[in-house]
Image (spheres, rainbow, N blue to C red):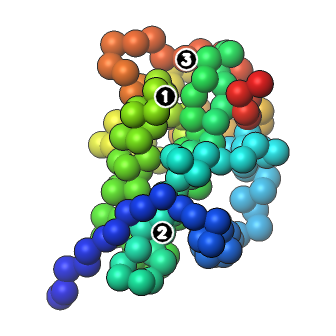
Amino acid sequence: MLALSWLIRNETPEDLAAIEALQADAFGPGRFAKTAFRLREGVDHDPRLSFVGMSGDVFAGSVWLTPITIGGAPSQLLGPLAVAPAFKNKGLGRLLVNQALKTALAFGERSVLLVGDAPYYGPLGFEPVPPGSITLPGPVDPARVLVANLVPGSPLPVGQARGGRG
């Protein structure tokens, strides 16, 4: 089997149609009702911290980071992370997340929140949020609320999570 090589780069405006189509395929129309989507509603993701993965000239996946606050402290929300079916389980998702986290830290971000599977995201630096420490604008399984502390030793954010920075 031929090994895939990836190009990870910042998204461009020209990528948006492909990203939105991939997200629609991956998550369906129900994505708009999810709590994480509600947190992003009306807030633009940060293109400096959002990436696409390419296999040659084929669009293979994407990840977004969106600015939020948690208890008034700035943070980022990871997601959606989406990989095209032909490229799943080949390491692209992990590469996209790692690039987003590394770049977020370089831009001075201190934490990244997400709603996702701990077995997948745990090895990438995410840990479960202590129960009741972060509240979201809708129902969510508390075991799926995860945070990556980008500055080891600094306190994790606590409080109500809100979209945007204002």
Tell me, for residue 109, which label it has, or none. Answer: 1
Inter-mark Cα distance, 3 to 1: 12 Å
Of 11 and 110, nearer the camera is 11
Q: Which residue is mark 2?
A: 61
Which mark sits nearer the N-terminus, 3 or 1?
1
Asked whether the beta carbons under mark 3 and mark 1 sit within 8 Å of each other, the answer is: no
Tell me, for residue 7, which label it has, or none. Answer: none
In the image, residue 154 sits, relative to residue 64, either above or below, namely: above
Which mark sits nearer the N-terminus, 3 or 2?
2
Q: Which residue is mark 3?
A: 157
In the image, residue 63 sits, relative to residue 163, either above or below, namely: below
Residue 123, how many percent across, how many down? 30, 43
Residue 39, how many percent across, how many down? 73, 39
Answer yes or no: is residue 141 visible: no
* Lateral position of residue 134 relative to residue 99, left or right: right
Q: Identify the element where label 2 is drawn.
A: strand
Residue shown at 31% from the left, 64% from the top: 91
- Quarter of the picture containing the N terminus is bottom left
Which mark sits nearer the N-terminus, 1 or 2?
2
Q: Identify the element where label 1 is drawn.
A: loop
- Quarter of the picture containing the C terminus is top right
Residue shown at 82% from the left, 45% from the top: 42
Tag nearer the camera, 1 or 2: 1
Of 31 and 10, nearer the camera is 10
Inter-mark Cα distance, 3 to 2: 29 Å
Of 138 and 61, nearer the camera is 61
Residue type at tag 3? Pro
Residue type at tag 2? Gly
Q: Count of labels shown?
A: 3
